Amino acid sequence: MERWRPPVTAACQKMRLPVTVDPAGFPYLSSLETLPQKHSIARSRNYNNTTSAKQAAGLSFCARCLAAELPHLSMLLCRVSAVSRTLARWGRRSQQGGGLLLLPRALSFSCGRCHGVGSGEASSGQALYRDTVLLPRTEFPMKLTGQKLLDRELEIQKVCGFADLYSWQRERKSKKEFCLHDGPPYANGDPHVGHALNKILKDIRNRFEVLRGRQVHYIPGWDCHGLPIELKALGELGTGGLSPLQIRQKARAFAEGAIARQKAAFQRWGVMADWDQCYYTYDGAYEAAQLKVFQEMHGKGLIYQDYKPVFWSPSSRTALAEAELEYNPEHVSRAIYATFPLITLPPEITSEEGLEGASVLVWTTQPWTIPANQAVCYMPNAQYSLVKRADNSQLLLVATERMGSMAALLGTELESVGTFTGSQLEGGICKHPTIPDKEVPLLPANHVTMAKGTGLVHTAPAHGMDDYSVASQFKLSVECMVDEDGKFTELAGPELQNLSVMSEGTDKVISMLKECGALVKEEQCVHSYPYDWRTKQPVVIRPSKQWFINTASLKDKATEALQKVRVLPESARSSLLAMLDRRTYWCISRQRSWGVPIPVFYHRETAEALINKHTVSHIADLFKEKGSDCWWELPIETLLPAEVLKKSKAGPVTDYVRGEDVLDIWFDSGASWAAVLKESDPRADAYVEGKDQLGGWFQSSLLTSVAVRNKAPYKSLVVHGFAVSEKGEKMSKSLGNVVDPDEVISGGKDASAPGYGADVLRWWVAESNVFSEVQIGPTALNSARDSINKLRNTLKFLLGNLQGFDPRVQAVDPKEMHYIDQYMLHLLREYSIKVTDAYSEFDAGRAIRVLQAFINRDLSSFYFSIIKDRLYCEPEDSLGRRSCQTALEEILDGVTRSIAPILPHLAEEVYLHAPGHDEGETLFKSGWIKSSSVWRRPGLEEAVEGACAIRDSFLSSIPGKNAAQYDLTIAIEPGLLFELMESLQEEPTSTSSQLAELMMVARVNLTSKLPRDLPPDAILSHGTFLINLEVGRLPVPALPGARLTGSVTGQTLRHHDDQHTITLAVFCLAAFR
């Protein structure tokens, strides 16, 4: 192989390297041996191209072998070798015309061992040649795994003051405050991924606000009362033989242990807060604030005591609110069709013949309620038919609309013998099927539907909400035949007494109906049924004397207040309103010990309640000082002193006993706005919780706040989904798909389960679509880890190329920077705007997508690929290199700050390695992305993006080829676009202009005309570029026949829309052999 002769580049000319001209007139570099000592490689870095320096030393290299020695140099070799005798001949000529000229001969190199260089020489020369380029250098590791990663995160938390950050930002002066009110997690177990999803989502927003300079108000809290804690604390002991104070003592200890474990986990996840100043619903001051809300609502008549049906949990022996129910869609009930014989015909149909012996047919999924029946309801405007069964001639009254379904169900034809409107049934009376001599009326009701059953509804006011409304309207009896354990009482009769209504009691009632001939049909019915969310057992509806909130009177105000609240996602608003609309009243009393006592006293003889502003205020003061245990600890004389009795105009204290019920825990947490938020304006900027809180904390907080202050306690609601397995299944220990966040961070007991660290867990939260169900598992976590490692690689490149650079003294003024560097600052500014908007919308996933697009498209694929020559090969203090470093430092700073809310550990680690700040300074105390409006210069964007459009067209014309193997001639007709390109290259021909760097070619010829003589095999193509001063951004279409549109703005450019013709002449360079 003939020795390859390196061409003369601009850098070589600047260095005055010795040049020789071959017989064909082609200039090349002579051997480095003839250079004076001051030009030796060992003593100088002033080489624009290391490959030139190596080849100038008289060595022969092939591209592949040289790339193996120094990976970066493979691109440089292609670039300096991009000269041929053909180009030398064609490059000196010019010709009118235009087009895209491609010579098909590609540059090729031999891939054998480098001629004249043995393995020993290559090895010994590696260090020598590495010193000739400014390669990246940094101690920042590209990847951290295992225990090193975990130790590093803990070290970052300590060194960078994670524990003190919240207190620091609360003490600094700030014009604006951001308040995110923490919905209290339940203190009944270990931390789980649901906690991680919620707490990290909140922390991302809080850290973003701290970086923006706002003062964040965020006080973590815990919901500490309630049955689940009580049950877990007592375990197998139960409540038998224990006093309320003993139960409360055990429950408090259990809650404190759960709080300690959860708090430690939240801190490990990097959640920012003052963990010594949290709120707890069992704290005396909190309970006192809660009672003040209770007092306000009671004083307005919104809280009252009544005897009415409530959801009752036999397994918990307490009343439940709607928010404490879980609906099991697979519940199986024994549904029955039963007859109620008509003993008194409705007056309006007595004249009809053949009605003797008719029975009303009803359907119910709860046969155990039949003994409590007080009426049968019909729809007034519906049509009803008296039908005769073909199989046994039985006469049945059913809705006309349901005749077809009933015939199919009974397996016989039904003949209509009479049709009536519902209103004509008024006045009819039926005989109760199981209770002799009991009569039940036919009554109109609006809750009757035709979706299922017979169109006639069995009504038991004690065991149904709608049934109770009918009873209230028509003054029916509301007798309860079911006790607190869910068993029939003696009122149900000796046959049913002490039988569980949901099991053997149901069996017995069906048997009784069968014996009296009233049972027509029995079937299995799979339907949605309410369960106790704590015990996972079915509930019943039974009447009980309880304390209620009249939510019906608050609905309109609450709905109006919600109109001023922003809901994310907006689709959650309809669910919130629907749940609010269904809630006519809210039962707030519970028959347990572990909770806030309802501050009421009852008269020993009359059972009349004593409760007013005087009694409640006094109890609130006691709770604030001593805690709510004092309700049981103190004598009643202290709880109800003489002065309070006097103000209440009540009798002696001996006439009263203290109440035993406690408040619903949803009232506990629903009053948190009064206990935690500022008194001056107790409204939070945001409440952020899972979708289960639409009928829970979001609603209870809204109702209490509207009741007391006529406004919502929040300005915005953020509703996120649940964490589920990778298969989309609800997590369950029985399914073995539960993900423990502690194992995610630190690794499992199995060595094959890696420890990902806290930042991976945070990335998983941020990257997920939190407004739907969020999947977690090895696939999602591995993807998060890989994404962070790719990000670390980019950050390492940035840090490595900023070694020794101090932006405080070495940064280049933006006006003096290379256009491409200025353009990158412009892109950084756009990036900062987009990522700021994403965080402001609680959309960390969009922030990640914007980040990845910026890194992959604008940095890795574009900017990093064209600046390496300048970074590695120009003099260390040259303007071009410092300009590039100035841009890189701003990019590093902007990217690091933009990831900080999501990845605080990584961001602080990068900041420790980054230049430009004092030792000990931390990122979170130094602000948000510092973009400048100066970075958006008129004409800059148009010049660079115009060149990029030409670049993309050029690259698309040589697919799969190395651009550095080509000379590029750009022919543009005179005009605005030509002037823009001249701003990137002043000379007609250059190998080192900003335009040549951007095009990544050996040389760029910028001209208004193509060379005259074109080779016969040339491929000619044309393209146009439209400069539009008013519309749009520059796309990057490809030639041939492409139409490139862009925008030019600025006061100095006053042109009309102008179309320019662009012609690219691309010369492929051949190699010498």
Image (spheres, rainbow, N blue to C red):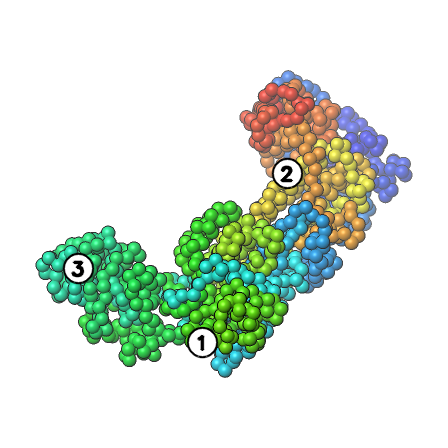
Q: Earlier in the sequence, mark 3 or mark 2?
A: 3
Secondary element at tag 2: helix
What's the residue type where badge 2 is placed? Glu
Question: Residue under circle 3?
Answer: 346
Q: Is residue 226 above or below residue 205?
A: below
Q: Is residue 607 visible?
A: yes
The quarter of the displayed image where residue 859 is located? top right
Kindly give the residue lying farthest to the top in the view shown. 96
Q: Where residue 1023 sits: x, y (%)?
A: 58, 25
Q: Where residue 497 sits: x, y (%)?
A: 32, 78
Q: Where residue 944 sits: x, y (%)?
A: 66, 31
Mark 1 is surrounded, within 10 Å at the Cα level, by few (under 14), some (14 to 19) or many (20 or more) other residues, namely few
Label annotation for residue 830: 2
CA–CA distance in space, label 1 to label 2: 74 Å
Secondary element at tag 1: loop
In front of the other: 690 or 277: 277
> Looking at the image, which residue is at 56% across and 59% down?
672
What's the residue type where badge 1 is placed? Arg
> Looking at the image, which residue is at 66% across and 39% down?
829
In front of the other: 166 or 57: 166
What's the residue type where badge 3 is placed? Pro
Question: Residue under circle 1?
Answer: 604
* Of the two numbered discs 3 and 2 in the rendering, the one whose residue sits closer to the viewer: 3
CA–CA distance in space, label 3 to label 2: 78 Å
